[in-house]
Amino acid sequence: MSRPWTRRDFIKVSAAAGGGLLVGVYGCRPGGEGAFAEAAGPLEPNAFVRIDPDGTVTVLSKHLEMGQGSYTGLATLVAEELDADWSRVRVVGAPADPSRYANLAFGVQGTGGSTAMANSFEQYRKAGAVARAMLVAAAARAWDLDAGELATEPGEVVHARSGRRASYGELAGTAATLPAPEDVPLKDPSTYRYIGKEGVALRVDARDKATGRATFTQDVKLPGMLTALVAHPPRFGARVASFDAAATLQVPGVAEVVQVPSGVAVLAEHFWAARKGREALRVTWDESEAARPSSAAISAEMRRLAEEPGREARREGDAEAALAGAATVVEATYEVPYLAHASMEPLNCVVHVTGDGVEIHNGEQFHTPDQAAVAGVFGLQPEQVRIHTLYAGGSFGRRAAKSADYILEAAHVAKAIDGRAPVKLVWTREDDMRAGFYRPPFVHRMRAGLDAGGGLVAWWHRAVGPAVMEGSVFDDGSGADPAGVEGASDHPYPVANVYVDQHSPSFGIPVQWWRSVGHSHTAFAVEVFMDELARAAGRDPVDFRRGLLSGDPRRLGVLELAADKAGWGSAAPQGRARGVAVHRSFNTYVAEVAEVSLERGRPKVHRVVCAVDCGVAVNPDVIRMQMESGIVFGLSAALYGAITLDDGAVVEGNFDRFRVARMSDAPEVEVHIVPSAEAPTGVGEPGTPPIAPAVANALAALTGRPVRSLPLAPRGGAGTA
């Protein structure tokens, strides 16, 4: 059995790998003389960049590319300081090695929390700058010139006075013989060619994905490989009592049937045989410890807990006394359901047991914990588990599994057959939706007090929902779940009397971070409640927020920009209304204005205007893509998303029941980026939290009825409470 990845392991690796720039020179030969043409090897000045003799610049990405644009963003940073020719830049996934590739935001190698640009901004620029300095030094040596006389243009070192020039490919071999400089200056932003520029550093993965050349886990084919599907229990907590594989083994192509901790695996020569074999399998389940809640019972229990004191998360002043003395008290309860991640590519993983270890082929999101977990299954050292990081077709947090569940499942299948063949584990859509992890449901009970002039004098907030941090490397053992109140305990609106607490009940249904984590539901509660307070105060929603945000210029800036570009204050088109929300998550500020109508009783979002302040805009094209992506992803959840439980079993199994936004649901989206010199922050998640409250607030303005629960249109009509 594997030993779980613990917080102690996390801290030990963090201490070892969290020391700033991890340049770690390797592959450089000391000494060397003569013209650059004499050496033909690649230049590998550090862990992040390689330049081949043909001029190809390869950037090694420590972050997973799952559609969010991290490959392009990291390449932009390197290419800027290297002065690379963008057409010659390619990106590959780095190996699993936290000593070189740790995420500096949390110490282990992994992708999450919208940290890719924020933790890599200086690191990858320095990597490019070191490589550039070595190429310049190589040219200076070959031409017997001072390096200060030389300059670079995309892909070349040039000497303006003599007209000499040499490509990076020509210089790579000679540069590889030189020592890497300890410190190098970085460019002045006024000289940037790529960072902050539109239409220049285009997506490095776009062409291969569009033409089918990109390699995802499903594309991996190894000699003798078997495809495995696992029969999972119908309820969480159930276990295999017995199974009958006689009919399964009669299915052509089926090779073997084995029991693993998570269920019973059917291995076959190809997917269809494995699926037909699993359909023929007869499993008896021990459900004595299975969770059997219904969605209605979970909702009732959360609403009951919302009436009882919870674990304190914030206290300033005396909220109860201020509420008692307020001229107006506004109360509301908001509720959101379980949600599936439902990424385009369901879960999959290839495990190949070799003579000296194990190889993993996977869209790998959480390298260090997963590497340790697989090592535990086979009794290996983590470095004996080699991870080949491939593209992932989405994740939204699911592939950063707290328990490495599907990766461990693949490892256990490979171990159960004694490593006789490589194993490709495949989860169908139904497996992914019924046997996975979910964004937890939440109930938010809110109370606030206004004085006679409509000023905010008291804020009281109770959040109730399962803890996503429990059992993860971020669990500090206190029982508190900071993710459950992020965006709530630190809400931006100044008020002298604040109280926030939380309950973290467990219902036996596995939960995990989902795109924007706690912000996905706290933004809904806080920003819809703000509109209700504005109405109670007789104020315009934008003006009401503006009056409270004078001390928060970045949040105020995106609010005013979005409102201005959306035409706030002017009449909306006939039959439509506008709603607004502003929220900060992952240190990025986003405001969105949604323009909404009702068509046959269902909400229709026509237009969304988004303003984002994410510090330095490393790649504006990617930022726009991610805001658009986050908005449509959040719109799916706002309009339709819900995982429901019946006697502990998940009802939804595919997109016929778990609907996502379709082309006909997609609004016109405008994205406006605030110019900034602040350090860059993440954009993969912050576009999601504001869209649900913006749409809900528009519906409330349109109908005159408050909207307090999601989804808004599960199977007809707008959801209200």
Image: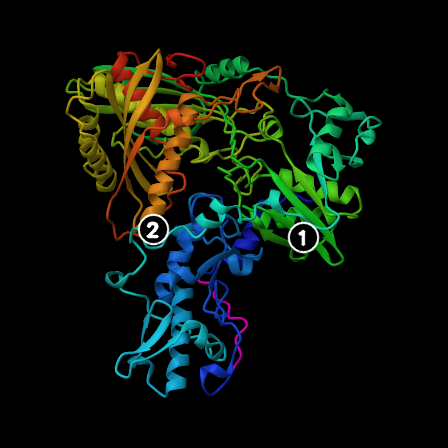
Magenta span contains residue 41: no
| 18 relative to 634 in the view: left or right | right
Quadrant assignment, res 333: top left
Q: Nearer the viewer, residue 289 or 244?
A: 244
620 relative to 303, above or below = below
Quadrant occupied by the N terminus = top right
Mark 1 or mark 2: whose residue is earlier in sequence: 1
Magenta stretch, residue numbers: 20-30
Residue drawn at x 53%, y 39% as measured from the top left:
475
500 relative to 76, above or below = above
Quick one: label 2, few (<14), some, or many (20+) residues within 10 Å?
Answer: many
Q: Amino acid at mark 2?
A: Asn
**Residue 232 visible:** yes
Residue drawn at x 48%, y 25% as measured from the top left:
465
**Residue 321 visible:** no
- Tell me the SS state at disc 2: loop
Q: Position of residue 718 (x, y in %)?
A: 37, 14
